[in-house]
Amino acid sequence: MKLTLVSAAILASSVVPRLGLAQDKIIKVDGSSTVYPITEAVAEDFQGENRGVKVTVGISGTGGGFKKFVRAELDVADASRPITKAEIEECKKNGVEYIELPVAFDALTVVINKQNTWAKNMTVAELKKLWEPEAQGKVTKWNQINPAWPDAEIQLYGAGADSGTFEYFTEAINGKSKASRGDYTPSEDDNVLVKGVEGSKNALGYFGMAYYLAHQDKLTAVNVSWEKNKATKDAVAPTTTNVNNGTYAPLSRPLFIYVNKKSAETRPEVKKFVDFYLANARTLTTEVKYVPLPDAAYETIKSRWAKLQTGTVFGGEAAIGLKIEEILTREAK
């Protein structure tokens, strides 16, 4: 009897499961678009060395990733800010134990169009005047921030509400997480923000340093001065050196992965993936234009991971202006 293409396909589909052919083991990661370039680079190299394991990396934003993580839908959550008190409670309610692992530093970068010649230096107070909730519909022109600047409408681009970048920026600049004007163009996809600022002389936006460095031929990074900066009162550029020496404040921040402890304990491929992540974090973080942690910090983090030490050192709050050394001396709870 001759098989038609259809009957052959049906036969093949019924035979394959019986043969017990190996399916890819899938590691599910989702969360921060800021951390995404690091995790994607790690996943690509890991899969190259571990055939039969597939790592899926989503970019639903830190908040979006944690929504899935607290329901045990992810093995790993990428996060550009620490887990919150509400998320900690959801983890407890759902029996999800987690391991908090800082993997890099980022300089959250305020950017302007290359044609903007007036706002290359800004104070935190000026940024607050522009981004605070009270500015909505009222502070719409550059000369309202500084009388010496143009009488021109500002186009604003920033992180979406599910983004850890949004939460960190609003707390660092406005003094309260998620407190922001709403009349701007939001997105969890940083590439959308890049294109927006590239397209208008009067635009201003903010996102992770890696996205700025990838487009620095078309964007200018704003130097930021902060009256609470203990190191300097000058306007400071977002650079690797300034992140490491602590002068780029308050917009330097740690980046994290959070690992589901059950996944790490019961699925060898997850344990192997995180081992690989920490072993290669320094190299791949540098490769994608973020700031690696000091070697001693990675050793401390590897030790915590080896013990599968659960909990957070942040108590559900952001770490505004903290150095990695200060973070790592805390005990997880």
Image (spheres, helix red, strand yellow):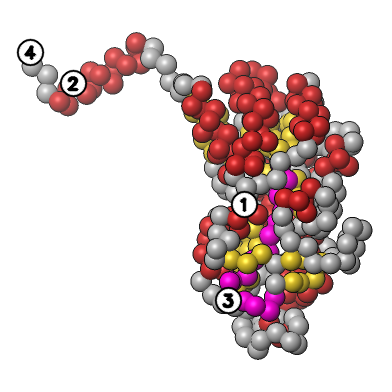
- Amino acid type, label 4: Met
Residue beneath label 3, please? 115
Viewer-nearest residue: 161 or 281? 281
| SS of the residue under disc 4 | loop
Where residue 305 appears, x then y in whole percent? Answer: 75, 25
Mark 3 or mark 2: whose residue is earlier in sequence:
2
Magenta-span inclusion, residue 109:
yes
Nearer to us in this view, 90 or 278: 278
Which quarter of the rendered picture does the C terminus lie within?
top right
Toward the viewer: 143 or 210? Answer: 210
Say which residue label 4 marks: 1
**Mark with earlier residue (1, 3):** 3
The magenta span reads 104-119
Residue drawn at point x = 74 percent, y = 34 percent = 101
**Image location of residue 20, percent across then percent down:** 39, 12
Quadrant of the rendered image containing residue 224: bottom right
Residue farthest toward the left in the current orientation of the protein: 1
Mark 2 crowdedness (10 Å alpha carbons): few <14, some 14-19, many ≥20: few
Nearer the observer, disc 3 or disc 4?
Answer: 3
In terms of sequence position, does the residue under pointer 4 or pointer 2 come before the other? 4
Which amino acid does the dot numbered 3 rest on? Gln
Horizontal relation, residue 61 to residue 147: left or right: left
Q: Amino acid at mark 1?
A: Ala
Tell which tag, 3 or 2, sits nearer the viewer. 3
Tell which tag, 2 or 1, sits nearer the viewer.
Answer: 1
Q: Nearer the viewer's eye, disc 4 or disc 1? A: 1
Q: Which residue is mark 1?
A: 210
Q: Position of residue 263 (x, y in %)?
A: 64, 24
Question: Left or right: where does residue 153 sit relative to residue 14?
Answer: right
Secondary structure beneath dot 3 equals: loop
Q: With 4 as the anchor, is 214 left or right in this view?
A: right
